[in-house]
Image (cartoon, helix red, strand yellow):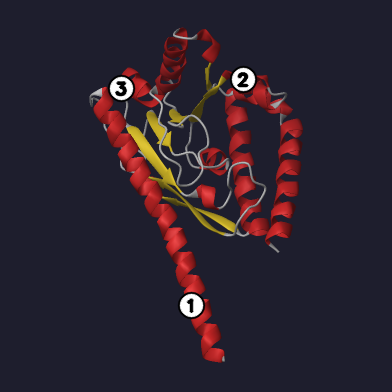
Amino acid sequence: MLALRSLAFNICFYAATTVLAVVGLPTLISGRSVMGLARAWGQITLWLLRVVAGTRVEFRGMENIPPGPLLVAAKHQSALETLALCTVLPDFAYVLKKELLLIPLIGWYLSRSGMVAIDRSKGTRAMSLMNAAAGAAIGRGRQLIIFPEGTRRPVGAAPAYKQGLSHLYVALNVPCVPVALNTGLFWARNSLVRRPGTAVIEFLPPIPPGLPRQEFQALAQERLEAASAALVDEVQRGRVELRAGAVAEASARR
């Protein structure tokens, strides 16, 4: 059953993505239109997950998102949070590698929507170029999303935080909202299996600007790791209790 539901979701997801990418071409006339298309893509994906795969997404801590421009530092376990965050942040922009702009169709949308692309081939200049693009996004009041570890990491993997987060925190001088999650339990990287249950994406209290760089880096990592571990444990503990309850019920029937 799990395999069939996962297969059905993947077929629907990639079909919907292809249709939106083609039908949405007229939205390239403006960045705002592209942002609307991105939100629709995220909402359709969450709907398909719930209806087809039995996976719900719960957002917690929405009250911790301050108005205006800010830095959003999200744990990265899955493609799920990339899509889900589009649906709740009003004017988001992602920090991403420049190579993604070369993907046919998708790259056009990313370029038009004003994402902050890092050109790693520029070496030491990459940071200054990123600062300029990030500063422009923040100047327009956007919520700049960065994955501090740079790539998706399996649930339970040792932290591998890069310096890009603290670099932007100091350069931009805006609040930083850490985002903890447990999405890797339901949509694991490099896997086509979509597990049923409730994935949680939690916005933690913002870290105000002005902290020393290394102090901020340590604090952000500590909060993200502790909160994400708690969310993972919440699911795993629930599964153990569910199995124990099922065993007890089966024993009672004998």
Disc number for residue 174? none
Q: Residue at x 52, y 79 (%)?
A: 247
Depth order, front residue of 242/104: 242
> CA separation, marks 2 and 1?
49 Å
User: What residue would you read off at disc 2?
Assistant: 99
User: What residue would you read off at disc 1?
Assistant: 245
Q: Residue at x 43, y 12 (%)?
A: 132
Q: Position of residue 122 (x, y in %)?
A: 51, 8
Quadrant in the rendering for residue 18 = top right
Judge depth for marks 1 and 3 and give the one in front.
1
Q: Amino acid at mark 2?
A: Glu
Q: Position of residue 184 (x, y in %)?
A: 53, 47
Instruction: Look at the numbered disc 2 and give the secondary structure of its residue.
Output: helix
Q: Name the side, left or right, on which 231 lies relative to 42.
A: left
Position of the C terminus, as image quadrant, is bottom right
Judge depth for marks 3 and 2 and give the one in front.
2
Neighbour class for label 2 at 10 Å: few (<14), some, many (≥20)?
few
User: What residue would you read off at disc 3?
Assistant: 173
Q: Name the side, left or right, on which 162 lies relative to 187.
A: left
Q: Amino acid at mark 3?
A: Asn
Depth order, front residue of 247/72: 247
Depth order, front residue of 90/154: 154
Q: Amino acid at mark 1?
A: Gly
For residue 84, above or below residue 236: above
Neighbour class for label 3 at 10 Å: few (<14), some, many (≥20)?
some
